[in-house]
Image (cartoon, grey):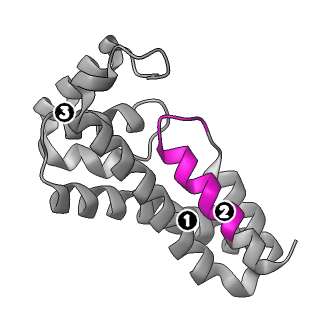
Amino acid sequence: MPELLAHIALAASAFLSATLLPGTSEAALLATAAEWPNAVISLFLVATLANTTGSIVNWWLGTHVDRFAGARWFPVSQERLAKAQALSNRYGLWILLFAWIPVIGDPLTLAAGVMRVRFLPFAALVGAGKAIRYGLLLWGLQALT
């Protein structure tokens, strides 16, 4: 696979992983970084930006949850959304640094939209958390090789 195509595939994986759809962006990042170690910085940036953009889609869906919540394709139950809102209320905006955590991260970003969290603080906190996660993964890969 050419390097450009690997970047595009990584972007797609990272974006989908952050939306309400399942994905494996961590595995995709590690595989492409192992294949192209000289492109680690661009792979890090692509994964971080695409994953953050997917979370922004969740935030946007949350701002329109009244319209989507009853749809069959909408995969977040009212129960998971209520739990995410409770976490957000308890810990405030800083909980968004953990939007990368599987299972609870997607509902957290959706809940942020429901709760009308302002866009810039949302994007900054979510992006920072995702950058830290991907940075640690790449650091671990470098340490093992």
Task: Name the secondary structure under disc 1.
Answer: helix
Which amino acid type is shown beneath numbered disc 1?
Ala
Residue 125 place in picture, x, y as percent: 26, 58
> Do the residues under discs 2 and 1 have CB atoms within 8 angstroms?
yes
136 or 112, which lies in front? 112
Secondary structure mostly taken by the magenta-highlighted segment of the chain: helix
| Quadrant of the rendering where the N terminus is positioned | bottom right
Assign the C terminus to one quadrant of the image: bottom right
Amino acid tagged 3: Val
Give the CA distance from mark 3 to mark 2: 29 Å
| Residue placed furthest toward the right | 1
Left/right of residue 20 with respect to residue 30 in the rendered view? left
**Which residue is drawn at the image coordinates 76% and 72% (left, top)?**
5
Q: Residue at x 41, y 58 (%)?
A: 52
Mark 1 or mark 2, which is nearer the start of the sequence? Answer: 2
Label 1 belongs to which residue? 47
Q: Earlier in the sequence, mark 1 or mark 3?
A: 1
Query: Circle 1: is it few (<14), some (14-19), or many (20+) Cα within 10 Å?
Result: many
Under circle 2, the secondary element is helix
Q: Which residue is mark 3?
A: 114
Residue 108 drawn above or below residue 124: above
> Which segment is the magenta one?
8-22
Q: Nearer the viewer, residue 62 or 86?
A: 62
